[in-house]
Image (cartoon, rainbow, N blue to C red):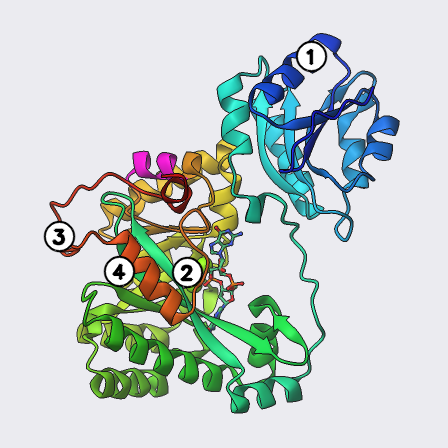
Amino acid sequence: MVDVTGNDKGTVLIVEDDPVQMSILRAMLRKLGVASLAATTVAQARVLLKSPEIRTVMLDLQLGGEAGLDVLRSLEVGQTPHSLIFISGCDERTRAAAVRLADAQGVHVVGSLGKPVTLERVANLLETSPACAWRVLSKEGPEASVTDFVDALAMGHIVTEYQPKVSLVSGLPVGVEALARWRSPILGNIAPDIFIPLAEGAGYIRALTGVILETSLQACSRWRREFPNVSVAVNIAPSLVDQQLLDLVTSLLEETGVPAGSLILEITESSAVADSVSVSNVLTRLRIKGVQLSIDDFGTGHSTLVSLLKMPFSELKLDRLFVASSSADPDADRILRSLVHLARDMGLRTVAEGIETNEVRNRLQDYGCEVGQGWLWAPALKEDALKAWMDRMTPRSTSISDPKTQLPYVSNQEAATS
Ligand code: C2E
Ligand code: MG
Ligand code: MG
Protein backbone atom coordinates (compact mmCIF):
# COMPACT_ATOMS: atom_id res chain seq x y z
CA MET A 1 0.00 0.00 0.00
CA VAL A 2 2.74 2.45 0.94
CA ASP A 3 5.53 3.44 -1.36
CA VAL A 4 7.65 6.51 -0.82
CA THR A 5 9.68 7.61 -3.81
CA GLY A 6 11.82 10.06 -1.82
CA ASN A 7 11.47 13.79 -2.32
CA ASP A 8 12.21 16.71 -0.03
CA LYS A 9 9.38 18.90 -1.36
CA GLY A 10 6.85 16.90 0.62
CA THR A 11 4.78 13.92 -0.34
CA VAL A 12 1.44 13.70 -2.10
CA LEU A 13 -1.11 11.33 -0.60
CA ILE A 14 -3.39 9.87 -3.29
CA VAL A 15 -6.74 8.68 -1.95
CA GLU A 16 -8.28 6.71 -4.83
CA ASP A 17 -9.96 3.27 -5.02
CA ASP A 18 -9.61 2.69 -8.75
CA PRO A 19 -6.32 0.76 -9.24
CA VAL A 20 -5.88 1.93 -12.85
CA GLN A 21 -6.40 5.58 -11.97
CA MET A 22 -4.09 5.14 -8.96
CA SER A 23 -1.22 3.79 -11.05
CA ILE A 24 -1.68 6.52 -13.69
CA LEU A 25 -1.50 9.22 -11.02
CA ARG A 26 1.53 7.72 -9.32
CA ALA A 27 3.33 7.40 -12.65
CA MET A 28 2.56 11.06 -13.39
CA LEU A 29 3.89 12.17 -10.00
CA ARG A 30 7.04 10.07 -10.47
CA LYS A 31 7.54 11.76 -13.83
CA LEU A 32 7.26 15.14 -12.08
CA GLY A 33 9.76 14.03 -9.41
CA VAL A 34 7.18 14.16 -6.61
CA ALA A 35 6.95 11.47 -3.90
CA SER A 36 3.62 9.79 -3.30
CA LEU A 37 1.75 7.59 -0.85
CA ALA A 38 -1.38 5.64 -1.73
CA ALA A 39 -4.57 4.94 0.20
CA THR A 40 -7.60 3.16 -1.19
CA THR A 41 -9.99 3.71 1.74
CA VAL A 42 -10.91 6.54 4.11
CA ALA A 43 -9.49 4.54 7.04
CA GLN A 44 -6.10 4.11 5.33
CA ALA A 45 -6.06 7.79 4.42
CA ARG A 46 -6.66 8.78 8.05
CA VAL A 47 -3.68 6.70 9.21
CA LEU A 48 -1.37 8.04 6.50
CA LEU A 49 -2.39 11.65 7.15
CA LYS A 50 -0.51 11.41 10.44
CA SER A 51 2.78 11.34 8.45
CA PRO A 52 4.35 14.79 8.72
CA GLU A 53 5.85 14.62 5.19
CA ILE A 54 2.41 14.73 3.53
CA ARG A 55 1.69 18.21 2.25
CA THR A 56 -0.80 17.60 -0.54
CA VAL A 57 -3.73 15.23 -0.73
CA MET A 58 -5.26 14.14 -4.03
CA LEU A 59 -8.72 12.94 -3.14
CA ASP A 60 -11.21 10.99 -5.24
CA LEU A 61 -14.63 12.35 -4.32
CA GLN A 62 -16.33 9.06 -5.24
CA LEU A 63 -14.33 6.64 -3.16
CA GLY A 64 -16.08 3.32 -3.75
CA GLY A 65 -19.24 3.33 -1.62
CA GLU A 66 -17.61 5.79 0.77
CA ALA A 67 -17.82 9.54 0.43
CA GLY A 68 -14.35 10.96 -0.24
CA LEU A 69 -15.51 14.05 1.62
CA ASP A 70 -15.21 12.07 4.87
CA VAL A 71 -11.43 12.39 4.53
CA LEU A 72 -11.84 16.14 4.95
CA ARG A 73 -12.63 15.66 8.62
CA SER A 74 -9.09 14.41 9.14
CA LEU A 75 -7.63 17.56 7.57
CA GLU A 76 -8.40 19.86 10.44
CA VAL A 77 -6.89 23.26 11.11
CA GLY A 78 -4.19 22.92 13.73
CA GLN A 79 -2.82 19.64 12.40
CA THR A 80 -0.11 19.54 9.75
CA PRO A 81 -1.38 21.94 7.07
CA HIS A 82 -2.46 20.18 3.89
CA SER A 83 -3.39 21.31 0.44
CA LEU A 84 -6.09 19.47 -1.38
CA ILE A 85 -6.64 18.49 -5.01
CA PHE A 86 -9.94 16.84 -5.85
CA ILE A 87 -10.13 14.11 -8.47
CA SER A 88 -13.61 13.41 -9.69
CA GLY A 89 -15.82 12.43 -12.59
CA CYS A 90 -18.59 14.60 -11.03
CA ASP A 91 -19.89 17.60 -12.92
CA GLU A 92 -18.21 21.00 -12.49
CA ARG A 93 -20.81 22.39 -10.07
CA THR A 94 -20.58 19.41 -7.70
CA ARG A 95 -16.80 19.68 -7.66
CA ALA A 96 -17.07 23.42 -6.99
CA ALA A 97 -19.45 22.76 -4.07
CA ALA A 98 -16.90 20.29 -2.63
CA VAL A 99 -14.18 22.93 -2.96
CA ARG A 100 -16.32 25.41 -1.01
CA LEU A 101 -16.94 22.79 1.69
CA ALA A 102 -13.21 22.22 2.10
CA ASP A 103 -12.53 25.97 2.14
CA ALA A 104 -15.09 26.40 4.89
CA GLN A 105 -13.14 23.83 6.94
CA GLY A 106 -9.95 25.85 6.52
CA VAL A 107 -8.34 23.44 4.05
CA HIS A 108 -6.53 25.12 1.16
CA VAL A 109 -7.90 23.70 -2.10
CA VAL A 110 -5.36 23.94 -4.89
CA GLY A 111 -7.86 22.85 -7.53
CA SER A 112 -9.79 19.95 -8.91
CA LEU A 113 -9.02 17.46 -11.65
CA GLY A 114 -11.77 16.15 -13.90
CA LYS A 115 -11.34 12.66 -15.37
CA PRO A 116 -9.35 11.72 -17.38
CA VAL A 117 -6.49 13.37 -15.55
CA THR A 118 -3.69 14.84 -17.67
CA LEU A 119 -0.01 15.27 -16.75
CA GLU A 120 -0.16 18.94 -17.70
CA ARG A 121 -3.06 19.64 -15.36
CA VAL A 122 -1.38 17.77 -12.46
CA ALA A 123 1.84 19.74 -13.06
CA ASN A 124 -0.10 23.02 -13.14
CA LEU A 125 -1.86 22.31 -9.87
CA LEU A 126 1.36 21.28 -8.13
CA GLU A 127 3.11 24.38 -9.38
CA THR A 128 1.75 26.61 -6.58
CA SER A 129 4.43 28.39 -4.58
CA PRO A 130 5.54 26.37 -1.52
CA ALA A 131 4.81 29.30 0.81
CA CYS A 132 1.14 29.19 0.01
CA ALA A 133 0.52 25.61 -0.96
CA TRP A 134 0.78 24.42 2.60
CA ARG A 135 -1.21 27.22 4.10
CA VAL A 136 -4.28 26.70 6.29
CA LEU A 137 -6.81 29.44 6.67
CA SER A 138 -6.63 30.01 10.39
CA LYS A 139 -6.28 33.12 12.49
CA GLU A 140 -4.11 31.46 15.10
CA GLY A 141 -1.36 33.59 16.63
CA PRO A 142 -0.31 35.33 19.80
CA GLU A 143 -3.02 36.97 21.91
CA ALA A 144 -2.77 40.78 22.08
CA SER A 145 -4.69 43.37 24.07
CA VAL A 146 -5.61 46.97 23.21
CA THR A 147 -2.93 48.17 25.67
CA ASP A 148 -0.31 46.04 23.86
CA PHE A 149 -1.42 47.64 20.60
CA VAL A 150 -1.27 51.22 21.90
CA ASP A 151 2.22 50.58 23.36
CA ALA A 152 3.35 49.01 20.07
CA LEU A 153 2.14 52.02 18.09
CA ALA A 154 3.92 54.41 20.44
CA MET A 155 7.17 52.39 20.38
CA GLY A 156 7.27 52.06 16.60
CA HIS A 157 6.65 48.31 16.60
CA ILE A 158 3.91 48.75 14.01
CA VAL A 159 5.83 49.09 10.79
CA THR A 160 4.95 49.47 7.11
CA GLU A 161 5.92 46.92 4.49
CA TYR A 162 5.24 47.08 0.79
CA GLN A 163 3.90 44.41 -1.53
CA PRO A 164 4.68 45.03 -5.22
CA LYS A 165 1.99 45.30 -7.90
CA VAL A 166 3.02 44.30 -11.39
CA SER A 167 1.63 45.18 -14.83
CA LEU A 168 0.18 42.02 -16.40
CA VAL A 169 0.98 43.55 -19.81
CA SER A 170 4.65 44.51 -19.41
CA GLY A 171 5.64 42.50 -16.32
CA LEU A 172 7.09 45.65 -14.77
CA PRO A 173 6.41 47.02 -11.27
CA VAL A 174 3.71 49.70 -11.30
CA GLY A 175 3.10 50.26 -7.61
CA VAL A 176 3.05 48.80 -4.12
CA GLU A 177 0.46 48.23 -1.43
CA ALA A 178 1.47 49.43 2.03
CA LEU A 179 0.60 46.80 4.62
CA ALA A 180 0.77 47.32 8.37
CA ARG A 181 2.93 44.80 10.24
CA TRP A 182 3.12 44.38 14.03
CA ARG A 183 6.60 43.13 14.90
CA SER A 184 6.52 42.71 18.66
CA PRO A 185 9.82 41.81 20.39
CA ILE A 186 7.76 40.06 23.10
CA LEU A 187 4.69 38.64 21.38
CA GLY A 188 6.26 37.94 17.98
CA ASN A 189 4.51 38.82 14.71
CA ILE A 190 0.82 39.56 15.02
CA ALA A 191 -1.31 39.30 11.88
CA PRO A 192 -3.29 42.31 10.55
CA ASP A 193 -6.39 40.11 10.59
CA ILE A 194 -6.04 40.25 14.39
CA PHE A 195 -4.80 43.78 15.13
CA ILE A 196 -6.79 45.76 12.52
CA PRO A 197 -10.17 44.75 14.01
CA LEU A 198 -8.65 45.34 17.48
CA ALA A 199 -7.60 48.87 16.49
CA GLU A 200 -10.97 49.53 14.81
CA GLY A 201 -12.94 48.28 17.83
CA ALA A 202 -10.91 50.36 20.31
CA GLY A 203 -10.90 53.56 18.26
CA TYR A 204 -7.21 53.50 17.24
CA ILE A 205 -7.63 52.88 13.52
CA ARG A 206 -7.21 56.58 12.68
CA ALA A 207 -3.93 56.73 14.62
CA LEU A 208 -2.67 53.59 12.86
CA THR A 209 -3.72 54.85 9.42
CA GLY A 210 -1.96 58.17 10.10
CA VAL A 211 1.31 56.31 10.78
CA ILE A 212 0.98 54.09 7.69
CA LEU A 213 0.03 57.01 5.40
CA GLU A 214 2.94 59.13 6.60
CA THR A 215 5.60 56.40 6.40
CA SER A 216 4.36 55.23 2.99
CA LEU A 217 4.34 58.70 1.43
CA GLN A 218 7.80 59.40 2.85
CA ALA A 219 9.08 56.11 1.43
CA CYS A 220 7.39 56.83 -1.91
CA SER A 221 9.12 60.22 -2.10
CA ARG A 222 12.45 58.35 -1.65
CA TRP A 223 11.89 55.65 -4.29
CA ARG A 224 10.36 58.20 -6.71
CA ARG A 225 13.89 59.49 -7.40
CA GLU A 226 14.63 56.21 -9.14
CA PHE A 227 11.16 54.84 -9.87
CA PRO A 228 8.96 57.91 -10.49
CA ASN A 229 5.98 55.90 -11.72
CA VAL A 230 5.70 53.45 -8.85
CA SER A 231 2.59 54.45 -6.87
CA VAL A 232 1.75 53.60 -3.27
CA ALA A 233 -1.62 52.24 -2.11
CA VAL A 234 -2.77 52.62 1.50
CA ASN A 235 -5.71 50.77 3.10
CA ILE A 236 -8.39 53.00 4.56
CA ALA A 237 -11.20 51.68 6.77
CA PRO A 238 -14.57 52.92 5.44
CA SER A 239 -15.29 54.60 8.80
CA LEU A 240 -12.32 56.95 8.22
CA VAL A 241 -13.54 58.50 4.99
CA ASP A 242 -14.29 62.03 6.28
CA GLN A 243 -13.02 65.62 6.24
CA GLN A 244 -10.19 64.74 8.66
CA LEU A 245 -8.84 62.19 6.20
CA LEU A 246 -9.07 64.69 3.35
CA ASP A 247 -7.08 67.24 5.42
CA LEU A 248 -4.46 64.68 6.44
CA VAL A 249 -3.95 63.43 2.88
CA THR A 250 -3.70 67.00 1.58
CA SER A 251 -1.04 68.02 4.11
CA LEU A 252 1.00 64.79 3.75
CA LEU A 253 1.06 65.10 -0.06
CA GLU A 254 2.30 68.67 0.31
CA GLU A 255 4.93 67.75 2.92
CA THR A 256 6.36 64.80 0.99
CA GLY A 257 6.02 66.25 -2.51
CA VAL A 258 4.42 63.04 -3.81
CA PRO A 259 1.98 63.85 -6.65
CA ALA A 260 -1.65 63.07 -5.76
CA GLY A 261 -1.87 60.65 -8.69
CA SER A 262 0.82 58.45 -7.10
CA LEU A 263 -1.35 57.81 -4.04
CA ILE A 264 -4.09 55.19 -4.15
CA LEU A 265 -6.51 54.87 -1.26
CA GLU A 266 -7.91 51.34 -0.99
CA ILE A 267 -11.32 51.34 0.63
CA THR A 268 -12.94 48.04 1.46
CA GLU A 269 -16.16 47.21 -0.32
CA SER A 270 -18.88 47.96 2.24
CA SER A 271 -22.41 49.25 2.47
CA ALA A 272 -21.13 52.19 4.57
CA VAL A 273 -19.27 53.38 1.47
CA ALA A 274 -21.93 52.60 -1.10
CA ASP A 275 -24.85 54.34 0.60
CA SER A 276 -23.40 57.46 2.25
CA VAL A 277 -23.64 60.96 0.78
CA SER A 278 -20.92 62.33 3.10
CA VAL A 279 -18.54 59.53 2.05
CA SER A 280 -19.33 60.30 -1.58
CA ASN A 281 -18.57 63.99 -0.91
CA VAL A 282 -15.08 63.23 0.53
CA LEU A 283 -14.27 60.66 -2.16
CA THR A 284 -15.25 63.09 -4.91
CA ARG A 285 -13.00 65.80 -3.42
CA LEU A 286 -10.09 63.36 -3.19
CA ARG A 287 -10.61 62.38 -6.83
CA ILE A 288 -10.77 66.01 -7.93
CA LYS A 289 -7.40 66.48 -6.22
CA GLY A 290 -6.09 63.59 -8.35
CA VAL A 291 -5.82 60.91 -5.62
CA GLN A 292 -6.72 57.47 -6.98
CA LEU A 293 -9.42 55.45 -5.25
CA SER A 294 -9.66 51.69 -5.24
CA ILE A 295 -12.50 49.41 -4.13
CA ASP A 296 -10.66 46.78 -2.07
CA ASP A 297 -11.65 43.13 -1.64
CA PHE A 298 -14.23 43.37 -4.40
CA GLY A 299 -16.24 40.19 -4.63
CA THR A 300 -16.64 39.66 -0.91
CA GLY A 301 -20.10 41.17 -1.30
CA HIS A 302 -21.12 43.75 1.27
CA SER A 303 -22.86 46.14 -1.07
CA THR A 304 -24.60 46.36 -4.36
CA LEU A 305 -22.47 46.66 -7.43
CA VAL A 306 -24.55 49.51 -8.79
CA SER A 307 -24.19 51.85 -5.80
CA LEU A 308 -20.45 51.21 -5.66
CA LEU A 309 -20.00 51.94 -9.32
CA LYS A 310 -21.73 55.29 -8.82
CA MET A 311 -18.86 56.37 -6.52
CA PRO A 312 -15.81 58.01 -8.11
CA PHE A 313 -13.48 54.99 -7.90
CA SER A 314 -10.65 54.61 -10.39
CA GLU A 315 -9.69 51.01 -9.61
CA LEU A 316 -11.33 47.75 -8.70
CA LYS A 317 -9.31 45.33 -6.60
CA LEU A 318 -10.47 41.75 -6.92
CA ASP A 319 -10.44 39.92 -3.60
CA ARG A 320 -7.70 37.34 -3.10
CA LEU A 321 -9.93 34.49 -1.94
CA PHE A 322 -12.19 35.11 -4.89
CA VAL A 323 -9.20 35.08 -7.26
CA ALA A 324 -7.82 31.91 -5.67
CA SER A 325 -11.12 30.03 -5.82
CA SER A 326 -11.45 30.73 -9.56
CA SER A 327 -8.97 27.92 -10.31
CA ALA A 328 -11.19 25.26 -8.88
CA ASP A 329 -14.64 26.82 -9.12
CA PRO A 330 -15.85 27.44 -12.70
CA ASP A 331 -18.65 29.73 -11.50
CA ALA A 332 -16.17 31.91 -9.57
CA ASP A 333 -14.04 31.98 -12.72
CA ARG A 334 -16.99 33.13 -14.87
CA ILE A 335 -17.83 35.88 -12.37
CA LEU A 336 -14.17 36.95 -12.27
CA ARG A 337 -14.04 37.23 -16.06
CA SER A 338 -17.30 39.20 -16.18
CA LEU A 339 -16.12 41.57 -13.43
CA VAL A 340 -12.90 42.33 -15.31
CA HIS A 341 -14.91 43.08 -18.45
CA LEU A 342 -17.46 45.19 -16.57
CA ALA A 343 -14.73 47.18 -14.80
CA ARG A 344 -12.98 47.81 -18.11
CA ASP A 345 -16.23 48.95 -19.72
CA MET A 346 -16.72 51.37 -16.82
CA GLY A 347 -13.19 52.73 -17.25
CA LEU A 348 -11.86 51.21 -14.02
CA ARG A 349 -8.40 49.66 -13.78
CA THR A 350 -8.56 46.09 -12.44
CA VAL A 351 -6.04 44.76 -9.95
CA ALA A 352 -6.12 41.12 -8.92
CA GLU A 353 -4.64 40.35 -5.53
CA GLY A 354 -3.52 36.99 -4.16
CA ILE A 355 -2.00 35.69 -7.43
CA GLU A 356 0.04 32.68 -6.41
CA THR A 357 0.44 30.69 -9.63
CA ASN A 358 1.33 31.24 -13.27
CA GLU A 359 -1.97 29.57 -14.19
CA VAL A 360 -4.02 32.25 -12.39
CA ARG A 361 -1.81 35.05 -13.72
CA ASN A 362 -2.17 33.82 -17.31
CA ARG A 363 -5.93 33.49 -17.02
CA LEU A 364 -6.32 37.00 -15.61
CA GLN A 365 -4.02 38.33 -18.31
CA ASP A 366 -6.29 36.68 -20.93
CA TYR A 367 -9.36 38.31 -19.35
CA GLY A 368 -7.70 41.72 -19.71
CA CYS A 369 -6.92 42.36 -16.03
CA GLU A 370 -4.23 45.05 -15.96
CA VAL A 371 -2.37 44.62 -12.70
CA GLY A 372 -1.48 41.66 -10.46
CA GLN A 373 -0.29 41.38 -6.88
CA GLY A 374 0.63 38.25 -4.99
CA TRP A 375 3.21 35.82 -3.75
CA LEU A 376 3.95 34.78 -7.36
CA TRP A 377 6.10 37.93 -7.43
CA ALA A 378 6.75 38.88 -3.81
CA PRO A 379 5.17 39.17 -0.35
CA ALA A 380 5.17 42.51 1.51
CA LEU A 381 8.81 43.67 1.78
CA LYS A 382 10.70 46.15 3.95
CA GLU A 383 11.62 49.35 2.11
CA ASP A 384 15.24 48.35 1.37
CA ALA A 385 14.23 44.85 0.16
CA LEU A 386 11.56 46.47 -2.02
CA LYS A 387 14.15 48.77 -3.60
CA ALA A 388 16.39 45.78 -4.34
CA TRP A 389 13.41 43.90 -5.82
CA MET A 390 12.47 46.86 -8.05
CA ASP A 391 16.09 47.18 -9.18
CA ARG A 392 16.03 43.52 -10.20
CA MET A 393 12.68 43.80 -11.99
CA THR A 394 13.34 47.04 -13.88
CA PRO A 395 15.71 46.89 -16.83
CA ARG A 396 18.04 49.89 -16.66
CA SER A 397 17.54 50.89 -20.29
CA THR A 398 13.75 50.95 -20.07
CA SER A 399 11.56 53.75 -18.83
CA ILE A 400 8.74 52.18 -16.83
CA SER A 401 6.44 54.98 -17.91
CA ASP A 402 6.65 53.96 -21.57
CA PRO A 403 3.30 52.29 -22.33
CA LYS A 404 4.74 50.70 -25.46
CA THR A 405 7.23 48.69 -23.42
CA GLN A 406 6.29 45.05 -23.85
CA LEU A 407 9.03 43.17 -22.07
CA PRO A 408 8.81 39.44 -21.70
CA TYR A 409 7.03 38.67 -18.45
CA VAL A 410 9.28 37.54 -15.56
CA SER A 411 7.86 36.16 -12.32
CA ASN A 412 9.99 35.59 -9.22
CA GLN A 413 9.69 31.83 -9.80
CA GLU A 414 11.07 32.21 -13.31
CA ALA A 415 13.71 34.75 -12.24
CA ALA A 416 14.89 32.37 -9.52
CA THR A 417 15.45 29.55 -12.00
CA SER A 418 17.06 31.64 -14.74
P1 C2E B 1 -5.81 43.62 1.84
O1 C2E B 1 -5.82 45.11 1.78
O2 C2E B 1 -6.75 42.92 0.92
O3 C2E B 1 -4.32 43.22 1.61
C1 C2E B 1 -3.91 42.15 0.87
C2 C2E B 1 -3.66 40.97 1.75
O4 C2E B 1 -3.41 39.85 0.93
C3 C2E B 1 -2.44 41.12 2.64
O5 C2E B 1 -2.69 40.42 3.84
C4 C2E B 1 -1.36 40.38 1.87
O6 C2E B 1 -0.28 39.95 2.65
C5 C2E B 1 -2.20 39.24 1.34
N1 C2E B 1 -1.63 38.61 0.16
C6 C2E B 1 -0.92 39.22 -0.80
N2 C2E B 1 -0.57 38.36 -1.76
C7 C2E B 1 -1.06 37.16 -1.39
C8 C2E B 1 -1.03 35.87 -1.99
O7 C2E B 1 -0.48 35.63 -3.08
N3 C2E B 1 -1.69 34.87 -1.35
C9 C2E B 1 -2.34 35.11 -0.15
N4 C2E B 1 -2.94 34.08 0.44
N5 C2E B 1 -2.37 36.31 0.45
C10 C2E B 1 -1.75 37.33 -0.17
P2 C2E B 1 -2.34 41.04 5.22
O8 C2E B 1 -1.10 41.83 5.16
O9 C2E B 1 -2.46 39.92 6.20
O10 C2E B 1 -3.50 42.06 5.44
C11 C2E B 1 -4.80 41.63 5.65
C12 C2E B 1 -5.72 42.81 5.62
O11 C2E B 1 -5.47 43.69 6.72
C13 C2E B 1 -5.54 43.70 4.39
O12 C2E B 1 -6.15 43.10 3.31
C14 C2E B 1 -6.20 44.97 4.86
O13 C2E B 1 -7.61 44.86 4.75
C15 C2E B 1 -5.84 44.98 6.34
N6 C2E B 1 -4.74 45.93 6.52
C16 C2E B 1 -3.41 45.75 6.41
N7 C2E B 1 -2.76 46.91 6.65
C17 C2E B 1 -3.71 47.84 6.92
C18 C2E B 1 -3.70 49.24 7.23
O14 C2E B 1 -2.67 49.90 7.29
N8 C2E B 1 -4.92 49.84 7.45
C19 C2E B 1 -6.11 49.18 7.35
N9 C2E B 1 -7.24 49.84 7.55
N10 C2E B 1 -6.17 47.87 7.03
C20 C2E B 1 -4.98 47.21 6.82
MG1 MG C 1 -5.80 46.44 0.38
MG1 MG D 1 -7.70 43.33 -0.65
- Which circle's residue, 4 or 3, is located before the other in the chain? 4
| Left or right position of 48 against 304 | right
Q: Which residues are magenta?
A: 361-368
Q: Nearer the viewer, mark 2 or mark 3?
A: 3
- Which circle's residue, 2 or 3, is located before the other in the chain? 2
In the displayed structure, 322 sits above or below 268; it is above
Crowding around mark 3 (Cα neighbors within 10 Å: few <14, some 14 to 19, many 20+) is: few
Give the Cα distance between marks 2 and 1: 45 Å
| Left or right position of 252 against 404 | right
The amino acid pointed to by label 4 is Ser
Inspect the magenta stretch and tell me whether residue 64 lies in it. Answer: no
Q: Residue 240: where, in percent of width, then height?
A: 43, 79
Q: Residue 32: where, in percent of width, then height?
A: 55, 24
Residue positioned most to the top = 20
Inspect the magenta stretch and tell me whether residue 367 lies in it. Answer: yes
Residue at figure coordinates x 81%, y 20% from the top left: 40
